[in-house]
Image: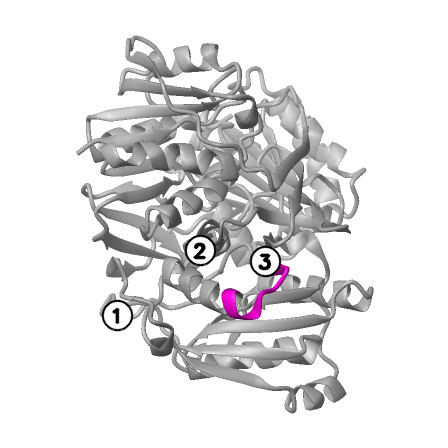
């Protein structure tokens, strides 16, 4: 079985982002970048499956600018066998990304495609579902547990009401929740080894896909600030304030 | 121009956020039609027809729609799409799972999780866990929009008399099978719509200690929330999680207990009207969004809080 894992480079989740003064976006220069957190869960799950002997190859793919390749390199250090970097510039919407990954899926013919359920930069939560629609494959979104069966997977999904379990036949798409597993850190020897693993570079222009954005970002601004609150001295004062000042209890 | 609203329901009743999505749909255009897909949904379809903002209901019933599988729903909605300029539903796990599948079939770039309708093609949406707001304009002819339910008031739920038409059943998608759903039943108000939410974090130290939160919540008629750290630690089930990847809540009162206030948690609660934080670390980021902060050991503060609440003559419900 072959697993394709899609990873995205985003601003690190610990960074307090800053909005550019001209309203054109957020500051990314000299800001720490990392792999989108649930994409780490996607890689981890693929590696665990390979370690259990049920997968033969893991291919990590990213779509983006030159530096996005770092995320593929990290995936290789954690256990992916080889990488694909589709080089693009400028803004890419989830629809365009899913069309690009579809092309790679047609070439690589994986049995499973894993990715994070949502990117923490644009918070769109679309790419996996779109890819699955374009391929007419089953989708298991927000996965928190995966059981491999013969030619199918049983996936537990985190939904608003609790948990849902579905069975999907392969080939299939799974988008991973943070609770799926505990991503490992790459060891130094494995980081060194990963430098020798191959990454295929593909120019998006060679794929014949129109990636022109359909949605214009007119303005990015800071959300309204909350006015500063106060510290209360004790519980009695807190309850009194809630009752008589805020009038909420 | 007209808008197709996708109703969310449990085959018996409409789910509450359908009313919020209906409000958002009606702000895009007054001509709102609603589609409801499921099995044995007559009562829910009737309820939908009573929403005054809905002008027509399309009801599509078949056994393979019983469990809301996106692979089955999407083709049915795509068939209806040619008559509509917009397709709208909630950005909860139902809509997040379904809408991108529809958008891809229609070759449309979806606009996710809007918090405001500026015009029929321009919307406001949070990015970076709500640390920035983006104003976006979609140039696609057909627009697929998911809305953040807590950012729109629920619409009126009675008085409407929309016609109910039967819609065309699409073919079953055989590669996805529903197995089971474990819903956690509770007598408490629903987390997404509760007036008061009491949430616990890693500071609770154990699942057992959550009974301190339960007591306060019972007293206040509140829903119980939790940080991701508390859910990951196994103190409480995932349906209680508030945050960027959990639920977004906007109650009148949010009480954060033993929660440090990671960016991703703040994203789910910082629009609450009044925020209380109880934490023994005075430097915890949660205090930066709290209207009332109490620096204290929660294991001392919570019993005192109960005592003080018991002294009150009346408590708003």
At mark 1, the secondary structure is: loop
At mark 2, the secondary structure is: loop
Q: Nearer the viewer, residue B142 or B256?
A: B142
Query: Can residue B295 be seen in this snapshot?
Result: no
Identify the residue under disc 1: A21
Q: Position of residue A186 (x, y in %)?
A: 71, 78
Q: Nearer the viewer, mark 3 or mark 2?
A: 2
**What residue appears at the point 73 percent right and 61 percent down from the top-left corner?**
A182
Q: Chain of mark 3?
A: B
Identify the residue under disc 2: A123
Identify the residue under disc 3: B284
Asked which quadrant contains residue A89, the reply is bottom left
Q: Nearer the viewer, mark 1 or mark 3?
A: 1
**What residue appears at the point 67 percent right and 86 percent down from the top-left corner?**
A194
**What residue appears at the point 35 percent right and 20 percent down from the top-left corner?**
B58
Q: Nearer the viewer, mark 2 or mark 1?
A: 2
Q: Are marks 1 and 3 in contact (CB under 8 Å)?
A: no
Q: Chain of mark 1?
A: A
Q: Is residue B73 left or right of residue B125?
A: right
Separation of marks 1 and 3 at Cα, in angstroms: 28 Å
Q: Report the magenta residues as a range.
A: A106-114
At mark 3, the secondary structure is: loop
Q: Is residue B211 left or right of residue B138?
A: right
Q: Position of residue A210 (x, y in %)?
A: 29, 66
The colour scheme used to paint the residues is one colour
Q: Nearer the viewer, residue A63 or B17?
A: A63
Q: Nearer the viewer, residue B44 or B272?
A: B44
């Amino acid at each position: 079985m072959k697993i394709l894992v899609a990873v995205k480079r985003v601003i690190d989740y610990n960074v307090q982002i800053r909005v550019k003064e001209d309203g054109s976006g957020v500051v990314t220069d000299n800001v720490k970048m990392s792999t989108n957190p649930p994409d780490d869960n996607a890689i981890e799950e693929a590696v665990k499956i390979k370690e259990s002997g049920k997968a033969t190859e893991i291919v990590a793919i990213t779509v983006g600018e030159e530096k996005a390749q770092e995320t593929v390199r990290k995936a290789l250090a954690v256990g992916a066998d080889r990488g694909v970097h589709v080089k693009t510039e400028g803004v890419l919407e989830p629809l365009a990304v899913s069309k690009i990954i579809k092309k790679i899926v047609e070439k690589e013919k994986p049995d499973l495609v894993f990715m994070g359920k949502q990117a923490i930069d644009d918070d769109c939560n679309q790419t996996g579902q779109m890819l699955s629609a374009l391929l007419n494959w089953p989708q298991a979104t927000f996965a928190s547990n995966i059981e491999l069966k013969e030619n199918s997977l049983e996936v537990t999904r985190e939904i608003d009401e609790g948990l849902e379990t579905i069975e999907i036949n392969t080939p299939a798409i799974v988008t991973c929740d943070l609770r799926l597993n505990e991503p490992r850190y790459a060891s130094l020897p494995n980081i060194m080894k990963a430098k020798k693993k191959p990454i295929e570079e593909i120019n998006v222009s060679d794929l014949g896909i129109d990636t022109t954005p359909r949605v214009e970002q007119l303005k990015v601004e800071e959300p309204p600030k909350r006015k500063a609150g106060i510290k209360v001295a004790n519980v009695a004062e807190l309850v009194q304030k809630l009752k008589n000042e805020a009038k909420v209890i | 121009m007209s808008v197709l609203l996708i109703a969310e329901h449990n085959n018996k009743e409409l789910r509450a956020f359908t009313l919020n999505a209906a409000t958002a749909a009606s702000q895009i255009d007054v001509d709102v039609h609603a589609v409801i897909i499921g099995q044995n949904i007559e009562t829910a379809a009737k309820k939908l027809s009573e929403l005054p903002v809905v002008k027509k209901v399309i009801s599509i019933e078949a056994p393979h729609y019983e469990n809301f599988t996106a692979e089955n729903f999407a083709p049915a909605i795509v068939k209806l799409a040619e008559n509509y300029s917009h397709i709208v539903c909630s950005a909860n796990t139902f809509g997040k799972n379904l809408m991108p599948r529809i958008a891809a079939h229609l070759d449309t770039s979806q606009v996710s999780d809007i918090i405001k309708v500026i015009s029929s093609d321009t919307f406001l949406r949070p990015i970076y866990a709500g640390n920035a707001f983006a104003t976006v304009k979609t140039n696609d002819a057909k627009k697929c929009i998911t809305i953040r339910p807590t950012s729109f008031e629920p619409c009126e739920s009675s008085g409407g008399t929309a016609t109910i038409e039967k819609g065309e059943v699409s073919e079953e998608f055989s590669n996805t099978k529903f197995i089971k759903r474990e819903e956690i039943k509770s007598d408490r108000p629903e987390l997404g719509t509760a007036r008061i939410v009491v949430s616990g974090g890693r500071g609770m130290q154990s699942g057992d200690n959550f009974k301190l939160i339960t007591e306060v919540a019972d007293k206040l008629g509140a829903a119980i929330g939790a940080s991701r750290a508390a859910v990951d630690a196994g103190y409480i089930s995932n349906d209680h999680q508030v945050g960027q990847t959990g639920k977004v809540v906007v109650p009148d009162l949010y009480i954060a207990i033993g929660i440090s206030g990671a960016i991703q948690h703040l994203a789910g609660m910082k629009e609450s009207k009044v925020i209380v934080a109880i934490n023994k670390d005075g430097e915890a980021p949660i205090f930066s969004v709290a209207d009332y902060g109490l620096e204290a050991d929660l294991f001392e503060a919570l019993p005192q809080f109960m005592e003080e609440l018991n002294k009150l003559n009346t408590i708003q419900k």
